[in-house]
């Protein structure tokens, strides 16, 4: 190590009082400064760095010991060694009495040149070593200060066991551990199995530097990614690990976004300030028909209709000025020269200085969407026209039905009245054949009268407003059964199970039960023991109400005719009726938002089922007295 010249401060009582000492040390590589009083001693000692202060103990105003004490009492000069020179041993004994400060030494006559040189050389060397040590300690403190404030993990690990020996303060924010917690533990403990194998493989290497990435578990068992820079020296890993978790996340997002852009069905491309296209994704190729190579030789003006160029340039200028742009519909030209509709958005890409780099364009082909919207609008208008036409036609039909029903009733009543008058007045005189004809006329007139009643009922339930209210189905069914027994006496046994309370129009629901039970009574009337069951089955769809009989039944193959007006599966000779009753039932159920269906076998009976929307009904709390 190269040693600089030592600086010696000589404090003389009079000029050249220490001349002999200076001469003795003339062969040493020393620099001397000379002062003659205490004031100059302190001023010079504070302004320059000295390695030894030699004081003539014979100074008059303050003796040498007092000057030495002043130097030792100052924080900036207390570490400088002091050598007092006395004229005799007795003076030393008197002056040094009670002095305990370290770093104060002395010499007195007779002066031994070699001993004096050795003593001064030792004092200077010790001071120089102390200063060098202090500088190194300060340097180490500064280095540790800097290291502990780095956001990188700086550490020393045993190259064999991978145990942490030293680690900086960054271990806490990065991994969540304190220095005390992680020191002595192995790096392998914090790694995944795959990364642990990688590290063990690297351990086989001797010397050299290498880098690698690892996923590492933090104290909270979350994963962070570290980039390690390793130098192997004397069996140790000198490691610098940077937390790159955010960078990896950003890179993953960039990769994902890049993939999205590449695979997007939208046209996504960039052009520079001059309008030259500088990137072109697959979506742009699909929409416009140009390959990437072709597009990179073009300007954006090549795909913009001429009459829209000024408008587009104005929009781009607004974007460059920092204005935000909402998506707008506009038109573009594809490779075939066809005009297409696009949804256009754009944004300016700037560099770190705020200078424009490029314009990012996103365009979605909405040509088919617009055509579909126009077609939907056209269909909607046609539908609206048809609705108005149907409303008018329905009003005319209702007026016609009402008119016809009333106009037909008058002649029918006249015919029926005349037939009764003839029978009453000439009954015994009428020939059998003529009497049969009169009977046929009367029965068909009555049948026509029933058809007119059913037509009016069908029209009524088709347009009547629905008034929803809770309806106790047990009570309503019992009421309908009593009414049917009085109006149409029958021998059928009707069993009513526990039925729910439904939210429905009570008058309409009553008509449903009347029609279903009337049919069940009619078509089971030829059975020796007719039986009718009214019940309810809970299902996922809701409560399913059913009316079941053991009557004539029908062929399911022709069941699709049942709900059509005037459609019948049995002749009038077998069972009378007009074929409108089930049509009315279906219309009422569907107007409530429900569903009706059936099941039947010839000569074994039929079952009709219906449901109403779940929000319309709830279970009954019990069987009402009227239904028991």
Image (cartoon, grey):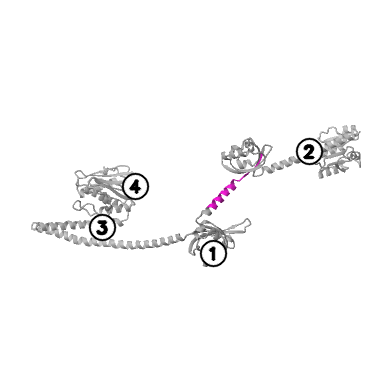
Where residue 427 appears, as percent x and y from the top left, is: 10, 57
Q: CA distance from mark 3 to mark 1?
A: 70 Å
Residue lying farthest to the bottom in this orientation: 307
Q: Are marks 1 and 4 in contact (CB under 8 Å)?
A: no
Q: CA distance from mark 4 to mark 3?
A: 29 Å
Q: Please say whether residue 342 is visible from this viewpoint.
A: yes
Tag of residue 617: 4
Q: CA distance from mark 1 to mark 2?
A: 80 Å
Tag of residue 443: none
- Residues drawn in magenta: 237-259
* Label 2 element class: helix
Residue at 59% across, 63% down:
274
Are there few (<14), some (14-19), or many (20+) residues within 10 Å of tag 4? some
Are there few (<14), some (14-19), or many (20+) residues within 10 Å of tag 1? some
Where residue 124 appears, as percent x and y from the top left, is: 83, 38
Q: CA distance from mark 4 to mark 2?
A: 99 Å
Tag of residue 456: 3
Question: Does the magenta run of residues contain 320?
Answer: no
Classify the position of the C terminus by image quarter: top left
Q: What residue is shown with label 1?
A: 302
* Label 4 element class: strand
Q: What residue is shown with label 2?
A: 130
* Label 3 element class: helix
Of badges 4 and 2, the one in the foreground is: 2
* Label 1 element class: helix
Q: Classify residue 358 by image quadrant.
A: bottom right
Q: Are marks 1 and 2 in contact (CB under 8 Å)?
A: no
Question: Does the magenta run of residues contain 243?
Answer: yes
Q: Earlier in the sequence, mark 1 or mark 4?
A: 1
Where residue 501 appears, as percent x and y from the top left, is: 32, 46
Where residue 41 appears, as percent x and y from the top left, is: 85, 42
Q: Earlier in the sequence, mark 1 or mark 2?
A: 2
């Amino acid at each position: 190590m190269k040693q600089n010249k030592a600086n010696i401060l000589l404090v003389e009582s009079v000029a050249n009082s220490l001349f002999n000492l200076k001469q003795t040390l003339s062969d040493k590589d020393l620099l001397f400064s000379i002062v003659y009083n205490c004031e100059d001693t302190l001023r010079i000692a504070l302004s320059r760095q000295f390695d030894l202060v030699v004081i003539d103990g014979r100074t008059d105003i303050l003796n040498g010991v007092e000057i030495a004490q002043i130097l030792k009492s100052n924080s900036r000069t207390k570490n400088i060694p002091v050598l007092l020179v006395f004229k005799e041993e007795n003076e030393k004994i008197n002056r040094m009495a009670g002095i305990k400060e370290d770093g104060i030494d002395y010499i007195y006559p007779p002066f031994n040149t070699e001993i004096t040189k050795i003593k001064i050389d030792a004092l200077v060397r010790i001071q120089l070593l102390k200063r060098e040590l202090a500088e190194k300690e300060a340097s180490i403190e500064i280095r540790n200060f800097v290291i502990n404030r780095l956001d990188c993990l700086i550490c020393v690990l045993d190259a064999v066991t991978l145990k942490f020996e030293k680690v900086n303060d960054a271990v806490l924010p990065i991994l969540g551990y304190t220095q005390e917690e992680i020191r002595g533990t192995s790096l392998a403990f914090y790694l995944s199995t795959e990364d642990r194998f990688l590290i063990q493989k690297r351990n086989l290497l001797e010397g050299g530097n290498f880098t690698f990435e690892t996923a590492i578990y933090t104290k909270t068992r979350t994963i962070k990614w570290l980039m390690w820079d390793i130098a192997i020296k004397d069996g140790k890993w000198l490691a610098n690990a940077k937390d790159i978790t955010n960078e990896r996340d950003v890179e993953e997002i960039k990769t994902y976004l890049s993939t999205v852009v590449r695979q997007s069905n939208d046209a996504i491309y960039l052009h520079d300030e001059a309008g030259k296209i500088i990137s072109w994704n697959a979506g742009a190729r699909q929409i416009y028909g140009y390959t990437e190579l072709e597009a990179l030789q073009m300007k954006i003006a090549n795909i913009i209709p001429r009459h829209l160029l000024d408008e587009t340039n104005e929009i781009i200028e607004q974007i460059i000025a920092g204005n935000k742009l909402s998506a707008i519909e506009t038109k573009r030209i594809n490779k075939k020269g066809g005009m297409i509709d696009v949804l256009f958005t754009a944004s300016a890409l700037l560099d770190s200085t705020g200078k424009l780099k490029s314009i990012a364009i996103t365009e979605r082909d909405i040509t088919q969407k617009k055509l579909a919207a126009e077609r939907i609008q056209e269909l909607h208008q046609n539908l609206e026209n048809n609705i108005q036409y149907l409303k008018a036609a329905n009003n005319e039909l209702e007026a016609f039905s009402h008119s016809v029903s009333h106009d037909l009733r008058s002649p029918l009543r006249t015919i029926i009245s005349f037939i009764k008058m003839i029978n009453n007045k000439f009954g015994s005189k009428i020939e059998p054949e003529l009497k049969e004809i009169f009977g046929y006329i009367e029965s068909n007139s009555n049948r026509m009268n029933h058809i007119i009643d059913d037509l009016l009922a069908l029209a009524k339930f088709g347009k009547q407003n629905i008034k929803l209210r809770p309806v106790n189905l047990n009570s309503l069914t019992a009421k309908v059964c009593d009414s049917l027994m009085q109006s149409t006496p029958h021998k059928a046994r009707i069993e009513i199970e526990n039925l729910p309370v439904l939210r429905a129009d009570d008058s309409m629901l009553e008509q449903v039960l009347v029609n279903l039970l009337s049919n069940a009574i009619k078509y089971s009337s030829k059975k020796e023991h007719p039986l009718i069951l009214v019940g309810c089955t809970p299902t996922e769809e809701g409560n399913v109400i059913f009316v079941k009989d053991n009557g004539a039944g029908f062929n399911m193959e022709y069941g699709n005719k049942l709900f059509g007006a005037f459609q019948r599966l049995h002749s009038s000779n077998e069972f009378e009726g007009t074929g409108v009753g089930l049509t009315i039932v279906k219309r009422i159920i569907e107007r409530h938002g429900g569903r009706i269906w059936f099941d039947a076998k010839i000569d074994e009976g039929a079952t009709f089922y219906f449901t109403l929307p779940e929000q319309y009904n709830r279970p009954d709390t019990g069987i009402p007295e009227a239904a028991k």
